[in-house]
Amino acid sequence: MREFIVEADGGSRGNPGPAGYGAVVIDAATGQTLAEAAEYIGVATNNVAEYRGLVAGLRAAYDLDPTATIHVRMDSKLVVEQMSGRWKIKHPDMKPLAFEAARVFAAPQVTYEWIPREQNKHADRLANEAMDAGKRGEQWSAAASMAELEAADARAARVAQAAGTAAEPEPSGPPGDAAAGAARARAALAEERASAAAEADGGAARADVSSARADVRAARTVAAPSSGWAPADMGAPATFVLLRHGETPLTPQKRFSGSGGTDPALSDVGRDQAERVGAALARRGTIQAVVASPLARTRETAGIVAARLGLEVSVEDGLRETDFGAWEGLTFGEVRERYPEDLNAWLADPEARPTGDGESFAATATRIAATRDKLIAAYAGRTVLLVTHVTPIKTFVRLALGAPPESLFRMELSAASLSAVAYYADGNASVRLFNDTSHLRG
């Protein structure tokens, strides 16, 4: 089941006075902004505007996936406590809005959390943009919004402050989203140029900022090709969360360990890693199915995680590791010493096989592509955990990016790391996460 975070806010300049609301829907698994909503609502109180923002956020989440679980985060103690059932709703203007909010999703699907105002900057900025638009006699326009950009800057500042480091901005949105990062940089430069040029040429400055805002909006469709494909129009994707198995006795020694070797089980460290993965994924609550490679280390990892999630494990042979032939159990240095010509050929040509009629990277890619298509059809619109190995995960990512085969040698993938790729109905893919090991720390 997918999990969304809904952040909502509302404000009134006068209380009552000119009022507006803002709401944002975020993918809990990736941090990606999925939808924004804002509106100028005329004269109203702060609390009415906050409730209107809540309703708008819940409706936006429902439009994305009516089966999702929703975690609402607001800086309004009143709304959070009333919607949680701890405080009574007495004001006649708020009763119908609370009733309307409660009807969007079934009660068990929604939880509420109060957060400090500084953690609700995205929705707050949307509400203020809506009120600013109302002051001009207009309605809020997503095309002119800079709320997501400013929220990203605020998150980066909090991360830097918590780490005790200078605030060099961290990228927001899906990890590895280079397009969004570049767009934010261009937008920041454009804002500076706009400020400097405002007195001399206000019109040109506004055009500069408008162009930067367009860059940010374009970057929201992660890895979208130039044809204008937009994930939001494709419905819920099939999302593969790719988990490399935990450590085995061979892992710290960096020995070749494919599908043709001794099939080692997890070490004690590997089992602890699997427990940590299970705990992290249980907190997110987004995994709907678990599929594993048939090898012992992946089935054991999958079993530990699935037990924590309350799910069964399905086995898919196509997710097995590459067969490294005679290199199984050897280190890279040992292979170079014993089979130098075969190793050089393997490094240079994806069609080359490891010594002893192992499996080429080209053959692995063909197998993974067929497995990918099979699983996309089986899990359309759902989030599934695939417990597999280094080469299959790198191949999923390489194929999603359209990268050349040699890119496999340029990716580092740690034991028990998480990566994620989403597949949309039109055949496009979006890499949302790569080699995340944050769940193993602490």
Image (tube, rainbow, N blue to C red):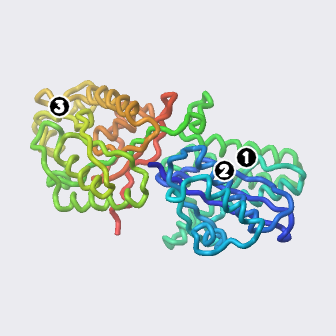
User: Mark 3 = which residue?
Assistant: 354
Position of 364 with respect to 178 (left or right) is left
Tell me the amino acid under the disc marked 2.
Answer: Glu
Is tag 1's residue or tag 3's residue first in the polypeptide sequence?
A: 1
Q: Is residue 216 above or below residue 351?
A: below
Q: Give the structural element (helix, strand or loop) at label 1.
A: helix
Say which residue appears at 13% left-offset and 33% top-offset: 325
In front here: 301 or 80?
80
Q: Residues within 10 Å of mark 3 (few under 14, many from 20)?
A: many
Residue 90, image x and y in percent?
72, 73
Q: Which of 387 and 144 is in front in this view?
A: 387
Q: Do the residues labelled 1 and 2 touch (CB within 8 Å)?
A: yes
Q: Distance between the residues labelled 1 and 2?
A: 8 Å
User: Disc 1 vs disc 3: which is toward the camera?
Assistant: 1
Q: What residue type is labelled 3?
A: Pro
- Residue 252, located in which quarter of the rendered image? bottom left
Image position, residue 60 (x, y; %) = 63, 48
- Mark 2 lies on residue: 36
Q: In this view, does 240 lie above or below 87?
A: above
